[in-house]
Image (cartoon, rainbow, N blue to C red):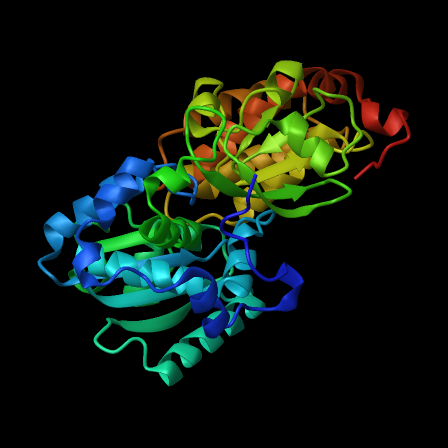
Amino acid sequence: MTERLLAGPPLDAGPESYAAHRTRLGPLPGDSGRGEVIQAIAQAGLLGRGGASFPVARKWSTVAERAGGRAVVLANGAEGEPLGAKDRVLMRSRPHLVIDGALLAAGAVGAERIVLYIGEEHVAAHAAITRALTERAAANRSAGAPGIELIAAPATYVAGEESAAVHYVNAGDARPTTVPPRPFERGVDGRATLVQNVESLAYAALIARMGPAWYLEAGRAETGGTTLVTIAGAPKSGVLEVELGTTIAELAAQAGVMYHVGSPVLLGGYFGTWVAGEAAWNTPLDPVALRRAGASLGAGIVAFLDPGECGVRVTARTLDYSAGQSAAQCGPCVFGLRAIADAAARIADLGSHQEDLVRISAWSRLIAGRGACHHPDGAAGLLQSAMRVFDRDFAAHQHHRQCVARQAGGRAA
């Protein structure tokens, strides 16, 4: 497979310069070609890379229909997921591709303002984007283009949710809003707002240059193209670009994982899904196939569980993080997640109350769909998948006060 987003200079060589970027890829299509860009993206079948896998062309069309030439583009590079790294790697190594995508989107939806929303802790990415904007200003290549501004996103998980991002730009408060209108209806400055993940924008910039047929040359399952994936818990952890349709087993081989095929894997990160078994390892990493299997790539994360780790303890730590990242605006988050996290911690520490295991199962079903945002849904889904994959481990912790990983000589925390 020919790499696409990450083609060019080595990732450890620093940000690609504007001159090198233009020499390698050429200019974006002129204004006459931008009217056709949404159609090209639709033909390519590009899906968003921020977690929901929503069709990019449909999102752009929806904003364009409501814009009246006054839309806003918010390029989302918050990446608050603890295990994620793909967006920051893209921004710090290929900043001009991200900016190209934002400019392209602005032309397609009729935007007069662009906001690059970058996690405040992603220092190298912020520096690379800043330098890239300076290079473009010096080259006077953005004359007549919408103004571009950088805003540092708070280092919280919920800050990357699209309504939270809009709320922060408008009011300095990165909490999800609870009722319509949605950002595409009325977002930044009360205008129709396109909130799009930076990887999605970068790929749109390549499709605009190369065409949908080029994009569809890659991909081995139902969805075409490649995607960036963050590999965690492996000897060769890091960011890879892989064809959609690649399996977990193939990723494991690339990442140097020697675990038994079928060992537990966390897909999608802290608000993802635990999967295990040979069938799961051989399921294509494709949005359609994963949806049928009750999972998703989410924020593009594949985390392998070391055989010496305890799945119950890892899950408990993740739930504690989730409770700490609450948006603090509804009962399911403030009280429900904390109660679940505390009970899960007691089970993990072999000091649970008699009904803790039954309670966390019931509570996770109770809070799903009842929050002011989807934050509690993600935590509940992760717990439910963990209780399926690690069912024997949870039972041993609860009923026998035994940790299988500890007995096997693994890490106890």
Q: Is residue 128 left or right of residue 114?
A: right
Q: Is residue 393 left or right of residue 52?
A: right
Horizontal side, residue 33 vs residue 355: left or right? left
Say if 187 sits above or below 61 in the image. Answer: below
Residue 170, relative to residue 1: is it above or below?
Answer: below
Rendered residue at 89%/25% (across/down)? 408
In this rendering, does residue 47 appear at all?
A: no
Most foreground residue, 403 or 72: 72
Q: Nearer the viewer, residue 54 or 226?
A: 226
- Most extreme residue toward the left, as rendered? 68
Image location (x, y in percent) of residue 263: 72, 23
Is residue 86 in view? yes
Q: Quadrant of the N terminus?
A: top right
Image quadrant in which you'd find residue 43: top left
> Quadrant of the rendered structure where residue 215 is?
top left
Q: Farthest residue toward the bottom?
A: 138
Q: Please, is residue 73 above or below residue 311 in the view?
A: below
- The percent coordinates of residue 219 (x first, y second) are 47, 32
Image point (91%, 30%), residue name:
409
Q: 212 and 266: which one is in front?
A: 212
